């Protein structure tokens, strides 16, 4: 089984709908991250969490919210989706400071019509 | 702020050709440097890393050397294979604060037989 899983893998929704993307990990890592990937822009950090009670905004948090339900689960919500939130979304974990590597999930492709 | 500039793609090479993908960075202090690879339909995987000046990261025949004097971390491989076709991302991580990764825009590499 994959260490970092994301659900759903693909989602098409309409403008104004509330959407939740879920991330689960079995790596036992404290740190988790949400990124979005747009063509030609690389990955941009949306939110990150160092533990269940520590959640921080990233570079592009407007229009998004997160919930860290447990060490293993970190969800990303779009309260009212808009078309420019169409992107590929990645969850990642890190076992800092033991390593300085981030481990990525397979991604969720979200299309907002 | 921190930034990563990498060679724009797409790059198309014949099998067994020599590969260079350029990457330069701007950062405060002494960041760690990474190359990630994204195969079609998958999340990002760490390819190699270097944590201090003059370190050489290597994996699967790929190499990159951390050059502080030129603020560069160019990716090289002596003989590419069709299976190397993917998108390659250069990234840096500052070693203080939120430890977030800053990514370049990615370079799509296609190897033709």
Image (cartoon, rainbow, N blue to C red):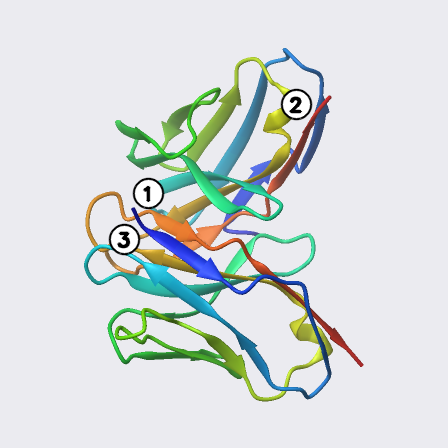
CB under 8 Å between discs 1 and 3: yes
Which disc is residue A83 wearing?
2
Disc 3 target residue: A96
Check the image and report above or below for A49 versus B104.
above
**Which residue sits at x=36%, y=47%?**
A28
Instruction: Classify mark 1: helix, strand or loop.
Output: strand
Does B95 sit left or right of A93 as displayed? Answer: left
Q: Secondary structure beneath disc 2? A: helix
Share a chain, discs 1 and 2? yes
Comparing labels 3 and 2, the label whose residue is closer to the camera:
2
**What is the spatial separation of the Cα atoms under label 1 and label 3, in whole angstroms?**
7 Å
Provide the secondary structure element on which disc 3 rests: loop
B42 horizontally vs B89: left or right: right
**Residue that appears at 62% across and 45% down:** A39
In this view of the protein, can residue A25 be seen by the observer? no
> Residue B84 is drawn in which quadrant?
bottom right
Q: Earlier in the sequence, mark 1 or mark 2?
A: 1
Q: Position of residue B6 (x, y in %)?
A: 49, 62
Q: CA distance from mark 3 to mark 2?
A: 35 Å
Q: Which residue is mark 1?
A: A31
Which chain letter matches label 3? A
Please tell me if label 3 and label 2 are on a single chain: yes
Q: CA distance from mark 1 to mark 2?
A: 29 Å
The residue lying furthest to the right in this view is: B113
Name above or below for residue A30 compared with residue B66. Answer: above
Q: Position of residue A2 (x, y in %)?
A: 56, 52
Nearer the N terminus, badge 3 or badge 2?
2
């Amino acid at each position: 089984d994959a260490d970092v899983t994301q659900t759903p893998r693909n989602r098409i929704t309409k403008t104004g709908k509330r959407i939740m993307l879920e991330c689960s990990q079995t790596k036992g890592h404290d740190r988790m991250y949400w990124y979005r990937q747009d063509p030609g822009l690389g990955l941009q950090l949306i939110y990150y969490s160092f533990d269940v009670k520590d959640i921080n905004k990233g570079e592009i948090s407007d229009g998004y919210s997160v919930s860290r339900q447990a060490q293993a689960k970190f969800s990303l919500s779009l309260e009212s989706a808009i078309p420019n939130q169409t992107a590929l979304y990645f969850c990642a974990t890190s076992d800092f400071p033991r390593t300085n590597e981030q481990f990525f999930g397979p991604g969720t492709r979200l299309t907002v019509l | 702020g921190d930034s990563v500039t990498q060679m724009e793609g797409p790059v198309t090479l014949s099998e067994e050709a020599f590969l260079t993908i350029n990457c330069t960075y701007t950062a405060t202090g002494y960041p760690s440097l990474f190359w990630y690879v994204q195969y079609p339909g998958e999340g990002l995987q760490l390819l190699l890393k270097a944590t201090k000046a003059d370190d050489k990261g290597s994996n699967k025949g790929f190499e990159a050397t951390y050059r502080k004097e030129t603020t560069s971390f160019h990716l090289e491989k002596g003989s590419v294979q069709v299976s190397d076709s993917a998108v390659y991302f250069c990234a840096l991580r500052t070693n203080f604060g939120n430890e977030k990764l800053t990514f370049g825009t990615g370079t799509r590499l296609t190897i033709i037989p």
